[in-house]
Image (cartoon, coloured by chain):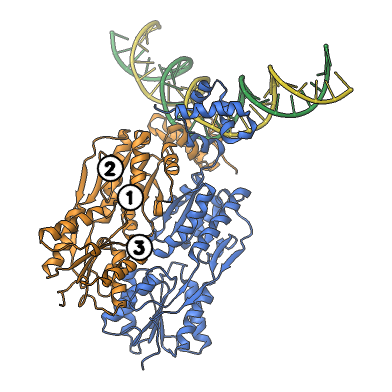
Chain colours: A blue, B orange, C yellow, D green
Amino acid sequence: MPDVSIKEVAKLAGVSIATVSRCINNPEKVTEKTRLRVREAIVETGYSPNTLAQSFRRGRTNLIMVVLPSIGDPFFTAVMRGVRTAAKAKGYSVIIEETQHNTMTDDEIGAMLVSRQTDGIILLATMSPFGSEVLSAKSRRRVPVVVGCEKVSPELADLPSVHVDNVAAARDATNYLISQGHKRIGMIYGQESSLLTEDRELGYRAAMKAAKLPLKDGWVVPGQLSISGARQATRELLKQPDRPTAIFCANDEMAMGCMHEVKAAGLGVPEDVSVIGFDDIRYAEVMDPPLTTISQPTEEIGERVMNRLCRRIEEGRGDGNGDSQIVPHDLVVRKSVGKPSG
Amino acid sequence: MPDVSIKEVAKLAGVSIATVSRCINNPEKVTEKTRLRVREAIVETGYSPNTLAQSFRRGRTNLIMVVLPSIGDPFFTAVMRGVRTAAKAKGYSVIIEETQHNTMTDDEIGAMLVSRQTDGIILLATMSPFGSEVLSAKSRRRVPVVVGCEKVSPELADLPSVHVDNVAAARDATNYLISQGHKRIGMIYGQESSLLTEDRELGYRAAMKAAKLPLKDGWVVPGQLSISGARQATRELLKQPDRPTAIFCANDEMAMGCMHEVKAAGLGVPEDVSVIGFDDIRYAEVMDPPLTTISQPTEEIGERVMNRLCRRIEEGRGDGNGDSQIVPHDLVVRKSVGKPSG
DNA sequence: GGTCGCAGGGTAAACGTTTACAATAAGGCG
DNA sequence: CGCCTTATTGTAAACGTTTACCCTGCGACC
């Protein structure tokens, strides 16, 4: 039974192909009687519509693409769960592209966007070259884009977005450390080119400044958003003459590496060094000690971002006024933060 | 510039659309002179081929689908990295579907497969109802399928696959525990319906039997492949009158939950209870203590599985003799296993 | 110089749908 | 009983490519 098309069904049912098509897409426009006859023919032939032809004809693929920094990050996979849920509900499939290490060239991304392979795009990561150059160009007029999880580069500021208030959340985290009596507070942020954690650094700096605490250069170091990067960063931090009594990590993944390295140096968490993370990934509570962190409503972000995209697609508009929705964050206190020892 | 098609290019270049098409796909069949003229017209109009039309015409989407139990699992995301690498090299995009909690009905999967939305399928998870019913039916004749990471249900035994020897690996893990002097060894496996960890349980049982060690019912419990499931399972295990001095977890994710719960019970790892995992996810080495586990060549599995699929697609064959490739596993010894205390 | 071969390029069909429009049948009302 | 409306179905065009086939013209060989 190689490849039965609508024609076979029509022939078997004794109707025209138009009627078959209508039976599938607008059943109410067809008589009960013929509908049954067609249904029968469909099952008998084992017909199912050729999605390629449908996509072609309708001009849409029901495919959306989400761009994120790393598929490995449990935070993003949690967001993705929300995206998928919403996507499935609306009949979309999801393609994931990761920008990891800038592996995608602008050309690749551009090609992906311009050729109408996907109906829309969700940006959970906006590397600067990516954002500005390609997206702001012609592509955006064709494909609806919405942004999630983070602030966007200024060029994309008019895109709709859904995210927590990263500045405020980072301030909350830092203030919590301060409230516990810490004065020497270090931070491990992401990487130079990434916007992901920039706001978190801003919030940290703001809180430190507001509390009139010192901000030494050696106290804020990049951790590449990875475990190994964070381990390296932690070693740097501990090497400082006045080493911090507390470390704010821009995400939990790095906090895992950080805590490991603190303990490897023979220091106790939180007795000697307190650690606080960001994201509340599912491993946070089984760490030793359980990680104090900022939680984000991951699934909600995913769903909302997807729903906004859907609305965009239905409106058929590529760009527009980009109001951003702020979702609430939450400080979850566990055991990795204590009073400073000295 | 809404939607420039091949026609505009042809007109501008003063040639027929066939020539334009040839310039793109078979440049050698066209004169240098016209080729240049067409190239010029292409950039001038900003033309790029409509992928939908191409897919439709050529009958292929350059999309492959991979089915896995959970996108959240770092092990699978590591495999995915290999898959993507290979896929990108061959010009494919990847759609991920997760079977998590059996959310996909057979109908959904069947629909996905039958409608030729994808050129091929990689199964990293074969839920039993999924495998047998849908795949073995007509679908398999149309879409090439290859299996990765695990054994497959008997009905699918003729599909090609790439995986470690799970039985042998589990035997190695168990034997390592035995070699350290453990006699009461528990196991946390996956879930009833999943084949993923079945072989690992088999290997465990085989090793225990070979060493003539007792196998109590209460010593092998399901952990749902999740942290919370493993925590629950660990509590069960510790409740046993003769509680195990060592626990073999069918994956690292569960080992994390297990270790946490052991410590929460006031016991030491490995002093009181040794823990060994499976997969060697990237968190294994920063756990406290660092996790002894079995490592799999994740990227290699991903790449090989993708390459096999490509070969299948090129041959245009849906099924065939399914020889399985075994890739090597490795015991990586860290700190979570010690000698039994009492 | 004529015929043959061949390269370059044009014409048009085909892929499987959807859908605007036409046609036909049926039914209601004057 | 005939005409008009409406409900249902059929006809055919269209979507943007790719490609089999044909045509034209040019060069080469006899």
Q: Earlier in the sequence, mark 3 or mark 2?
A: 3
Residue at position x 64%, y 32% from top? Answer: A29
- Count the labels in the image: 3
Chain hosting mark 1: B
Q: Secondary structure at mark 2?
A: helix
- Mark pair 3, 2: CA separation: 30 Å
Which chain letter matches label 2? B
Q: Nearer the viewer, residue A184 or A302?
A: A302
Q: Residue furthest bottom?
A: A342
- Kindly identify which residue carries mark 2: B308
Q: Nearer the viewer, mark 3 or mark 1?
A: 3
Residue type (three-letter) at the residue carrying disc 2: Arg
Q: Position of residue A294 (x, y in %)?
A: 46, 74
Residue B226, disc = 3
Residue B125 is marked as 1
Q: Is residue B219 above or below residue B56?
A: below
Q: Is residue B192 left or right of residue A139?
A: left
Task: Give the residue type at disc 3.
Answer: Ser
Q: Mark 3, residues whose alpha carbon is within 10 Å: few (<14), some, or many (≥20)?
A: many
Q: Quadrant of the C terminus of chain B?
A: bottom left
